Amino acid sequence: MKIPDFEKIIKFDTAFLKRIGSIAVIQHLKGMSKGIGPDGKKFKALSRRYANAKRKQGAKPIPDYRLSGTLQKDFNYLGGDNLDSGEFVVEIGIEMSKATTYPDRDLNTASVINFLHHGSRDRNIPPRPLYSNKAVLYEGAKKSIVEEIASSIAYNIQKELGGVTVHVINM
């Protein structure tokens, strides 16, 4: 029996990294639209002043990262990589060079998402974290990502062992 190359088994291709990134983006957009961070905590309520400003622009006066929808449209998978340690990383967010500039302000969506993540200095807009040290992913993404990892490892084992069928059992 051939001894498999374990480095090849845990090395993921760019299509896999993009799928993982897409899952993370979808879950982040869902969470943000509900006013909930990846840690499961609700975002702090908007100040009365900002809630009124959102109402005037036709948006719901809730802390949901949405005013015009432009920010959500720009929020995407940015890239991914395999690390020497056997881990992988994916990056999601808004690429500065592709960020949409708001016509009525000297701001783009990348600046706004950073601002919303940290909150305003005057605390008119409290922080609405997209990630924290305790939670990078929304709970809804974890199961899908584990399934993707298991499927990719099974596929890589199959390739490494020359076509031996490997089944992934979902629990």
Image (tube, rainbow, N blue to C red):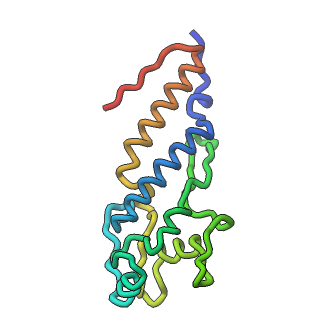
When the figure is inspected, residue 15 is found, relative to residue 57, above or below; the finding is above
Image quarter (top left, top right, bottom left or bottom right) of the C terminus: top left
Dividing the picture into quadrants, the one containing residue 55 is: bottom left
In the depicted view, which residue is nearer to us: 24 or 87? 24
Image quarter (top left, top right, bottom left or bottom right) of the N terminus: top right
When the figure is inspected, residue 114 is found, relative to residue 132, above or below; the finding is below
- Where is residue 111 drawn, in percent x and y? 58, 75
Dividing the picture into quadrants, the one containing residue 8 is: top right
Q: State how many labels appear.
A: 0
Q: At 62% across and 68% down in the image, what residue appears?
A: 99
- Where is residue 35 drawn, in percent x and y? 35, 68
Q: At 47% across and 75% down in the image, what residue appears?
A: 116
- Where is residue 119 drawn, in percent x and y? 46, 79
Q: At 52% across and 68% down in the image, what residue appears?
A: 70
Q: At 40% across and 60% down in the image, what residue appears?
A: 134
**Which residue is situated farthest in the top direction here?**
1
Dividing the picture into quadrants, the one containing residue 36 is: bottom left
When the figure is inspected, residue 58 is found, relative to residue 157, above or below; the finding is below
